[in-house]
Image (cartoon, helix red, strand yellow):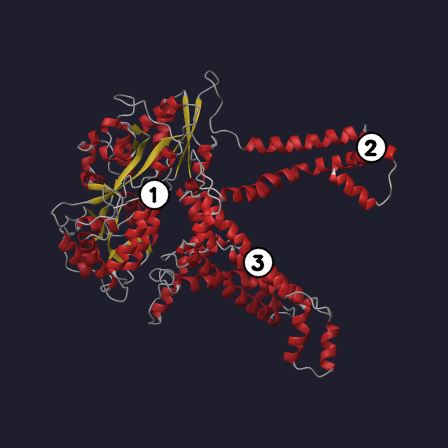
Amino acid sequence: MSAQTALRAREGAPLSRAREGAEPRRRRRRWQPAWLFMAPSLLILGVFVIYPILVSFWYSLHDWTIGAAVEPFVGLGNYIALFQDPQFYNALGNTVELTIVSVVLLIVLGLALAIGLLKDGPVTKIVRSTFFFPTVVSLTSIGLVWRFLLDPDIGLIGGISHALGLPALDWLQSTTLALPAVIFVDIWKNVGFVMIIFIGGLKAVPGERYEAGRLDGASEWQITRYITLPSIRPTLLFATLILTIQSLQLFDLVYVMTGGGPIFHTDTLVTELFREGFVNYRTGYASAISWVLFALIMLISALQLRIFRYDDVD
Amino acid sequence: MKKTLAVAASAATVLAALTGCSAGAGGSSGPGGSGSGPVKLTVWTGFTGGDRPGYDQIVKDFNASHKNIQVSMTVQPWDTITQKLPSAWLTGSGPDIAAPSSDPNVIAQYVKTNSVLPLTDTGSGSKINVDQIAPALIKEYTYNGKLYAVPANYATLSLYYNKKMFAAAGISAPPSTLAEFEADAKKLTKPGGKQYGLVLADNQTIQMWPILQWLGGGDIVSSNNCSALASPQSQASLKPWVDMVVKDKISPVGLTGAQADSLFSAGKAAMEMNGPWAAPGYKSAGIDLGIAPIPAGADGHSVTLGSTAPLAISAKTKYPQQAQEFLAYWTSKTEQKKFSLTTGFPTLRTDLASDPQLKANETIATFTAQVPDARLYLPKVPQATQVDANGYVPFIGQITRGQSLSAQAAAASKTINSLTGCSS
């Protein structure tokens, strides 16, 4: 009903009473096949994406355990419990720390590498590929490899330390070193990806801008600050956004390297979600965590879009 | 006309997509009804270790001797089963039979959600020989007077030791008392992480610390489901070991089970408490291996940890009778004897305890000798996996990193009591 009214209003043309009945029906018929052809993908999207999202919100309002005879409605009870749970704050703190440190370092290092390796040449191509290589390897494999490398007793890094007469640090068993170690591996894995994105962005900057800058006697720093950075702002925004979302959702690397330990010192929101949902089977509680994470990602993404928005002069 | 065709075409597309979807999600059981070939049963287990051939053999023997029932066993990591099984069984798309995991009190969750079938085909002969299976295990799997699972295996932990390191330290025999155990652990430790006396894992492992507690008269959760960690006996039982880890560095801190195993097989640790599955790996790593019973505790009795994985049937299976027949076969005397001989596991049947052939095998004999002294970790404790993950594991983690034993015991007790519902 309202759709028909809206359709008519948009067309803005007065319809005769005689045509009123026929016109919308014909239009609707024209729509039908399109929807039906889209149906398979819509169905898959609906069943595997939209429905789970909606139903997870429904779960989060219940004391939901897979298979329990009764699933009592608790309203915002799970959210209230979550905000009183020290483990949640611990996981949130770790996630935020991990995100801030890794995103800032990734952007800075990625940009520095991109600028350094911008010029095409046989050497830079090899170096670029080397940096990019970890990106194509699965995070799980990387986690496993680094877990072995960092092992103080049987790992390579511990072995080198021993050989040099230095104490071997137990990176992943130490409550102070575990999170920095995970952040390091996360950066090591992603820096090549960020570099490639920035190289793409930098190559798209028109050469005339630099020429004009140089003619006006701008220093290298001024060129970077006033030409390069503003020109690659869309790339910066894209990279920051993607990396932030990725870091907030970090799971596999932590799961493989530390399992959230030692004593929850590398526990992230998603490892906590996994533990509550798939080990303790507290589906309602886990769903509440996922919605808080969703809200957090939305909020931070909105903030980033605002911070990076174009000025009118652009 | 054109429109009708378009509608028909798109309807066909949708149908194709739908049927495409459902074809992959077929049920677990084979062609239904008798007369259309053998009944097909599916089994999920997480036996990926060195003991796997033993389980595979049982399935192979069963299929060979039961032409009317064919079993196929899928082996996948325990983590994967833990994630998939509850919903799979709930929706009836899961396997007919599964070993959910070897976590403490794991069956309780499935009993609560009515996902597992109570076993009724019990008795002597070819039925499930409940009376011949270790009583502690039957007790663990019985809820409200009904038996819901049989043990897929039963392992005890023994003391693995590196004979070469013992000889180098001038120790002639493995420790047999708690005092010797402590002294040896210290004596076998070389400073600077060159050699550890006794590697102790505390996370992602079959727990080792409870044994040390039990030896000294301590406990984790008492029979009324209240935390026993803060009791004077428990603290006294932990204190010497915690001191040895913190001050004497007899073991690195925060090890997972796999890391502890690697240290022992790399020849960097002199002792480790582990189950029979570890023996083949250590031998092939070239360790001059000795296996001894866990030393006697403060009261003169030995005690060790027993570990078991339950084998249960889905409440939604189409073939409850055949599935129980398989469980009966799995736990039968002949198959269990064969299984022990293949894997070195102690037997879960009481009537095999004095079997001459099993006794002749030194490894099996050592592990079997400890069955009477074995205790399960967190037996029948409500929310046992959370008591472990949120209570016990962080507790051991904190105290081995030098935190105050009494303060941490109080904190862990609070966590544990809120999980188990202990009110006193």
Q: Amino acid at mark 3?
A: Leu
Is B318 placed left or right of A191 in the picture? left
Residue at x 41% of width, y 60% of height:
A149
Q: Which mark is residue B383?
A: 1
Callout 1 secondary element? loop
Amino acid under disc 2: Gly
Note whether B421 is above or below B7 in the view shown.
below
Output the chain of dot 1: B
Name the residue beneath numbered marker 2.
A21
Mark 3 vs mark 1: give the one in front. 3
Q: Are marks 2 and 1 on the same chain?
A: no
Q: Are marks 3 and 1 on the same chain?
A: no
Label 2 – label 3 distance at C-alpha: 46 Å
- Does B268 sit above or below residue A281? below
- Which chain is mark 3 on? A
Q: Which mark is residue B100?
A: none
Residue B359 vertical placement versus A238 (above, below): above
Instruction: Find numbered disc 2 in the image and state the secondary structure of the residue it sits on.
Output: helix
What chain is tagged by disc 2? A
Q: Position of residue B294 (x, y in %)?
A: 19, 47
